Image (spheres, rainbow, N blue to C red):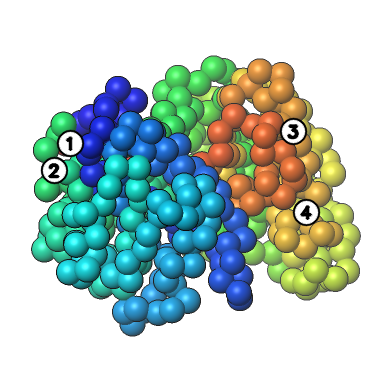
Amino acid sequence: MLQFDQYSFARKKVLIRVDFNVPLDEHKHITDDTRIRGAEPTIQKILDDGGSVVLMSHLGRPKEGPTEKYSLKHLLPRLAETFGSDKVSFVDDCISDEAFTLSASLQPGHVLLLENLRFYKEEEKGDRAFAEKLSHHGEVYINDAFGTAHRAHASTAVIADFFTSENKGFGYLMNAEIENAEFVLHKSKKPVTAIVGGAKVSDKIQLLERLVDIMDNILIGGGMAYTFIAAQGGKIGNSLFEPDFTELALKILAKAEQKNTKIYLPADSVSADRFAADAENQTTKSDMIPDGWMGLDIGPEAVETYKNVVLDSKTILWNGPMGVFEFKNFSNGTFSIAEAVANATDKGAFSLIGGGDSVSAIQQSGLSERVSYISTGGGAMLEFLEGKELPGISAIRS
C-alpha cells in the first residue's frame, strides 16, 4: 500500500472515498461540516502535488434511487469555498457516460464530485461490477472515509481489488483514526480509563468485554448503567432496563474483578417522572430509584467520583454520554465529564473521543480544542475498538 505522505500525486488522477454524510437543515444547508473539514488536508495534498481529485461519497439513506434531498450537489458551495468555484465541478450520476467523460478530462488542480453512491443499490450490496466501474474514475484509490470503513460496500472495500497495492492507500484522516485508536488499545500510558455511556448495554457489550482486558478503570453512565444496577439487585424504577443482558452484565463485572479492572457504576442518579425536558426531577441513590421514576443522568456524587478518576488518568477513551444531555436538566453529568476530560488532557493525558454522541457533547461544551483526538466514525470506531477487522481497512492492507 502507498505511503500517503511520501507519495507524489503529480499528474495523477486520484479517486478518493470520502465520508461526506453530513447533516443538512430544511434549506439543504450543512449544519456540521466536521467530516468535510476532516477530508480537506488529504484533498489539498493531492492538489498541491499537481494531481486531480474525483470525490465519491454517500449522503443519508435514500431508499428508492435518486432523491433530491440526498443529492451531493448541496455540498458543492461548501467545497467551492475551500478549493475555488472555478476548480470544483459536480456530475449528477456516479457511473454515467458524462461522469466518465468529466473524470477523464479532469485537469491537475481540479476536483470532480460524483453524485451520491447510494442512489445505486449495488453500492451497499458490495457489487463487484459496480465497484469496477467506479474504479475507472482514477489511477490511484485513496480511502479516507473512516466513518464507513466497517461496511463492505462497493466503494469502501470491493473497489480496492481493482488497484495494485502501490496505487491504493489511506488518506490523512484514515491514518489518524487508525493511529489514535491503536494508541489507546496498544500503547497507552497507565492509568487507562474508559468512559462508556449511551442507552443500551446491548450496543456496547462487545466493547465492554474487550475493554475489561485493557483498561484500569471503566466508568459506566447513561441508560446502560441501570441494567448493571438491576443485575446486582438494585431498584431502578422505570429506568431503561434490558433483562436479557443481566447475566452478561454480571459476567463482565466478574471478569473485571478477575482482571483487576475497576468498574464504576453511578452511586446516584438524577431521575425524572417521565421522559421529557420539563419533567419533574429528583436526585436519588441509583439503586433506590422510586417506582414511576427513571434515571436520566448521573448524580452529583457520581460526577465527583468520575471526575477524580478521569483527572488521575494518563489515557482516556470516551464513548457515549452520561445521560440525556439533550435535555438541559439532565446534561450536567455529560458536560462535567467533558470538562474533566479536557482538564486531564491539559495536564498531559491523551484523550480519544470515540465517535457518536460523545462528539456532539464535546463540541457543544466548547471543549473540542482541548482533547487529543475526536473520531469522525461512530460505528466504525466502536467496531475497531471491539477488535473487529474493518473491511475498508483490510481491503487496502491486503
Q: Quick check: 164 left or right of 273?
A: left
- The span from disc 2 to disc 3 (Cα, nearest Å) is 45 Å
Q: Residues within 10 Å of mark 3 (few under 14, many from 20)?
A: many
Q: Say which quarter of the image contains residue 233.
A: bottom right
User: Which residue is under mark 3?
Assistant: 340
Q: Nearer the viewer, mark 4 or mark 2?
A: 2
- The one nearer the camera, 27 or 19, is 27
Q: Label 3 vs label 4: CA separation?
A: 14 Å
Asked if disc 2 and disc 1 are in contact, CB closer than 8 Å, the reply is yes
Q: Is residue 395 above or below residue 277?
A: above
Foreground mark, 1 or 4?
1
> Mark 2 belongs to which amino acid?
Phe
Residue occupying the point 46% across, 42% down:
40
User: Is residue 210 rendered to the left or right of residue 357?
Assistant: left
Cα–Cα span, label 4 and label 2? 48 Å
In the drawing, what numbered circle is on residue 163?
A: 2
Q: Are marks 1 and 4 in contact (CB under 8 Å)?
A: no
Q: What secondary structure is found at the residue carrying circle 3?
A: helix
Using the image as rendered, state which of residue 175 and residue 141 is in the foreground.
Answer: 141
Residue 217, horizontal then vertical, whole percent: 60, 30
Sequence-wise, the earlier of marks 4 and 2 is 2
Q: Quadrant of the N terminus?
A: top left
Q: Amino acid type of disc 4?
A: Ser
At x 60% / y 47%, what residue is drawn? 359
Mark 2 and mark 1: span between their CA atoms?
A: 6 Å
